[in-house]
Amino acid sequence: MQNVSGKKCDYLLLICSEKAAVFIELKGQDFAHAMTQLNESIRHLYPPLRQAGFKKCRARIILTKRKNTQYNSNPKWLKLKKTIDVFDVDFSFHMEKKTDKL
């Protein structure tokens, strides 16, 4: 997302055979910041992707450290939830154990 101000997610994976866009945010533990980054990225990038024929939108947050992931009343979640509803996004988050091995 060059020339776009604001927060951005880490990756956008386009699965052309499925016409699906997957927004991916990798975080240590700052779940609230990850929600902001996904929200901004989806709002800026998914509308032109939809015009280009992409019909599915997925968003994933992957955390490597456990912290409070209670988000139902968080204002950043409410903003992201609105975006999820408007664009019919398949949303989930995952806890991953951090490893140094590839």
Image: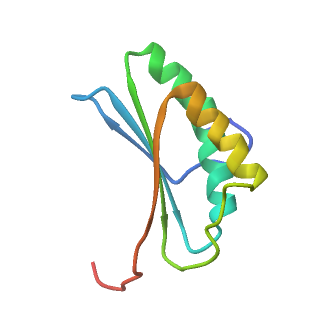
Q: x, y percentage for residue 60?
A: 46, 52
Outermost residue on the right side: it is: 75
Q: Is residue 56 above or below residue 93?
A: above
Q: Residue at x 29, y 84 (%)?
A: 101
The part of the image, by quadrant, that contains residue 55 is: top left
The part of the image, by quadrant, that contains residue 28 is: bottom right
Q: Is residue 34 left or right of residue 51?
A: right
Q: Is residue 95 left or right of residue 75?
A: left
Does residue 1 appear in this view? no
Q: Residue at x 68, y 59 (%)?
A: 33
Query: Where does the N terminus fall, quadrant-wise?
Result: top right
Colouring style: rainbow
Outermost residue on the front side: it is: 72
Query: Where does the C terminus fall, quadrant-wise?
Result: bottom left
Q: Is residue 91 above or below residue 18?
A: below
Does residue 87 appear in this view? yes
In the rendered picture of this protein, how many numbered marks are placed on residues? 0
Q: Residue at x 53, y 80 (%)?
A: 65
Q: x, y percentage for residue 10?
A: 52, 54
Outermost residue on the left side: it is: 17
Front-lying residue, 86 or 102: 86
